[in-house]
Image: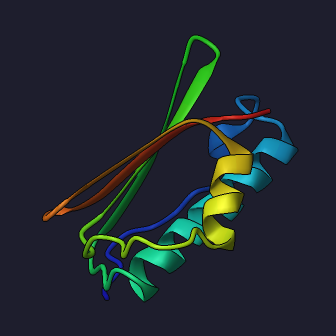
Amino acid sequence: MRIKNFGCYKQDLEGEFSDTTLLKVAEVIEELISNAIRHGGATTISVNVVSESGSSRVNFFDDGKKRVKGKPGLGSSLLKSLTKNLIIEESDEGTKISFGLID
């Protein structure tokens, strides 16, 4: 896997989110990246955070293979507990995950 450009700095989001929310977002994104590489074999990952009118959403995409259906693991529990309005779409091109932030 090759990462071309990656960076997220607290000062870029200053005033947008509480420290608690930033920590939650970092935990969730770390879990998503780990799973995309470990389970999906992803080679490309994209993450963006959109904040408009007091509402924020994280959009995540990876080009890994589809998840194997089975008993949800700790990562799934973490994702569900730290997010709202979770949307997961899987296709042959990869996985798109979108969620709102809980503050």
Give percent across and percent down for residue 57: 52, 33
- Count of numbered circles in the view: 0
User: Looking at this view, is 93 or 68 the one in front?
Assistant: 68
Give percent across and percent down for residue 86: 52, 40
Q: Quadrant of residue 19?
A: top right
Q: Residue furthest top?
A: 53
Q: Is residue 38 above or below residue 42?
A: below
User: Looking at this view, is 12 or 59 the one in front?
Assistant: 59
Query: Going 74% across and 48% down the picture, which residue do you hit?
Result: 81
Give percent across and percent down for residue 82: 72, 47
Give percent across and percent down for residue 22: 74, 48
Q: Is residue 82 above or below residue 54?
A: below
Q: Is residue 52 above or below residue 101?
A: above
Q: Quadrant of residue 59?
A: top left
Q: Quadrant of the N terminus?
A: bottom left
User: Looking at this view, is 41 or 3 the one in front?
Assistant: 41
